[in-house]
Image (spheres, helix red, strand yellow):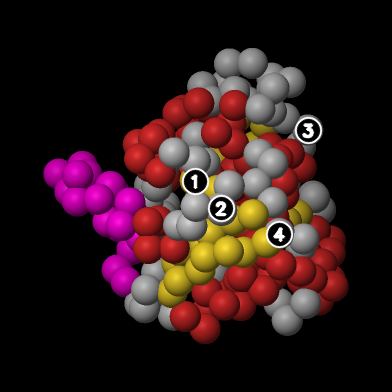
Amino acid sequence: MTALGFLSPGPSAADDYPRIEQLLGSDIRLDLVRTDRPAEGVEQLRLAGVEAVVWVCADEGVAPDPDTARNRLRDLATTAGTPASSTPFAFVRAAREIDATTVAVSASGTPRETARFAEFLRAGGLEVVGDTGAGPAEATGGDEEAGGDEEAALLALARAADDPRARAVLLPDPGLSTAAHLPALEAALGKPVLTASQVAVWEALRLTDRRVHAPELGALFTREPTVQV
């Protein structure tokens, strides 16, 4: 069993992680801790025996520069006793994994928050050709009865920033429930879509040298796996 830990200091799509765990279809456990006290959350994950920790964060996790962000992650790794990363770094690495060096970013946060994230991506070597901050929006909660409206809202959010030059569209808001809709979003846009919960799990797997082929989680999970479901 590979146990992966996720620390969320703010809103997160908690329903995505059980869904992704099921879709991975192998001996992988996903533990999400939502807490306003990161130190306590890390300790909880450490006691659960996780092998990697990913900080699932929005604007508060985007440091002024990559070096500062790396220092924060070193502190997190030391506390957890495991490899550690965060979703901003995960988005950069995931985009490179699918050869999407040119991306569009659409967030449900403010334009300022979106601009900060876009600058982080550029510092990581990506070209951002479209970005939009739609203003504060209520995160989708995964209600099955509202599934159609949820998917339509996600598609509208993605299309708001999409650009013909972009090789992928990024939805960085950790509060969005996206795991059930990735194939439909990618089919509608005709390109990969990367989301916070999706890249967080992919990054945690990368930190533990695991790869899982799970097309239901989008193009990111179809890249020559070393672990086949």
Q: Position of residue 155 (x, y in %)?
A: 33, 51
Q: Which stretch appears magenta?
A: 137-157
Question: Could you tell me which residue is drawn at 53 percent across and 25 percent down?
Answer: 214
The residue under the point 45% across, 71% down is 132
- The kind of residue tagged 4 is Leu
At label 1, which amino acid type do we have?
Val
Is the residue 210 above or below the residue 52 in the image? above
Q: Is residue 145 covered in magenta? A: yes
Q: Earlier in the sequence, mark 4 or mark 3?
A: 4
Residue at the spot of label 2:
166
Name the residue furthest top. 228
According to the picture, the residue beneath numbered tag 1 turns out to be: 193
Which of disc 3 and disc 1 is earlier in sequence?
Answer: 1
Marked residue nearer the N-terminal end (2 or 3): 2
- The reply to whether residue 127 is visible in this rendering is yes
Tag 3: amino acid:
Asp
Residue at x 76%, y 69% (from the top left corner): 123
Nearer to us: label 1 or label 3? 1
Q: Position of residue 162 (x, y in %)?
A: 45, 57
The quadrant in which the C terminus is found is top right
Disc 1 secondary structure class: strand
- The 10 Å Cα crowd at callout 1, few under 14, some 14 to 19, many 20 or more, is many
Q: Nearer the viewer, mark 4 or mark 3?
A: 4
Q: Earlier in the sequence, mark 2 or mark 4?
A: 4
Is the residue 94 above or below the residue 210 in the image? below
Kind of residue at disc 2: Ala
How far is the residue under mark 2 from the one under mark 3?
29 Å
Look at the picture and state if 104 lies above or below 216.
below
Where does label 3 land, which residue?
209
Percent across and percent down for residue 166 are 56, 53
